[in-house]
Image: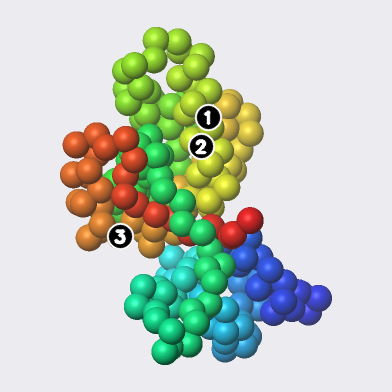
Amino acid sequence: MNPAITHRHVIVRLLNGPIYQEDLDLWGRLGAEWDKIKSHFVEMGLEVARDDNAGYAFIRQCEEEEESNEGWDDAQTSPLPRVLRRTRLTYHQTIFMVLLREELMRFEQSQEDGDHLYRSALDLREMMVSYYPELHDEKKIHRQISSLVTKFEEWGILKKVRDRDEGLYRVERIIKAKLPPEKLAEVRDQIKRRLPEIDDEMEEEDA
């Protein structure tokens, strides 16, 4: 582990997105100074969600802080401002999230070779193209799907691991925390009703 990487580097990185086990220096420092890093975020009303088996860590709003925000009155301590903002997923973003989650479930259940699920840019495009029946311009559909992929890269759910042949992407297991099994059925039902916006949320750094 690089001694130049301190707990402060881990804190800053977590504020910008998830840390994965492959980030050896950051992951090692996260484990070595876990209590200090965890306490830092608790003071901000945040918690570090960490899964050593899946190899990821990210920050989210503490449940206790959420509850205090909902029931606060003048006789209580003022709740902390939110550090993470809620982002309401669009219809197509939600479909993409569900499809990727289901792909990962099938991959894990089938015990395919390899530790990670990979999909090409073409795979991702074919996965989504049927959900744009209102569009008849193939180039426009491809642009919209490309913007979806880019957004999921920003959220740390997809990671581009190869540029040639339009690109190869790894589906990160953090999606399991973003969309757990109990939530998946609920979101599927909402998709069937085709709401213009799905009542599902993700947390990101507040700008």
Q: Is residue 21 left or right of residue 5?
A: left
- Identify the image's colour scheme: rainbow, by chain, secondary structure or one colour: rainbow
Disc 1, disc 2: CB below 8 Å?
Answer: yes
In the rendered image, is residue 25 in sight?
A: no
Kind of residue at disc 3: Pro
Q: Disc 1 and disc 3: Cα gap in Å?
A: 25 Å
Q: Residue at x 39, y 58 (%)?
A: 178
Where in the figure is residue 173, as x and y percent of width and height? 43, 57
Which residue is rendered at x = 49% and y = 35% of the image? 148
Q: Which mark is residue 180?
A: 3
x and y percentages locating residue 126 in the rendered image: 38, 25
Residue at the image point whose x is 54% and y is 71% from the top = 81
Residue 81 sits above or below residue 126 on the image: below
Instruction: Name the residue tied to disc 1.
Output: 146
Task: Say which mark, if any, is on residue 137.
Answer: none
Query: In terms of depth relative to the viewer, which is nearer, 26 or 95?
Result: 95
Task: Specify which label sits upstream in the sequence, 1 or 3.
Answer: 1
Q: Is residue 89 visible?
A: yes
Name which quarter of the figure residue 125 lies in. top left
Q: Relative to 36, does residue 157 appear above or below in the rendering?
A: above
Q: Give amino acid for label 1.
A: Ser
Q: State how far apart marks 3 and 2 are (Cα).
A: 21 Å
110 left or right of 167 in image = left
Circle 2 residue: 149
Q: Is residue 97 above or below residue 81?
A: above
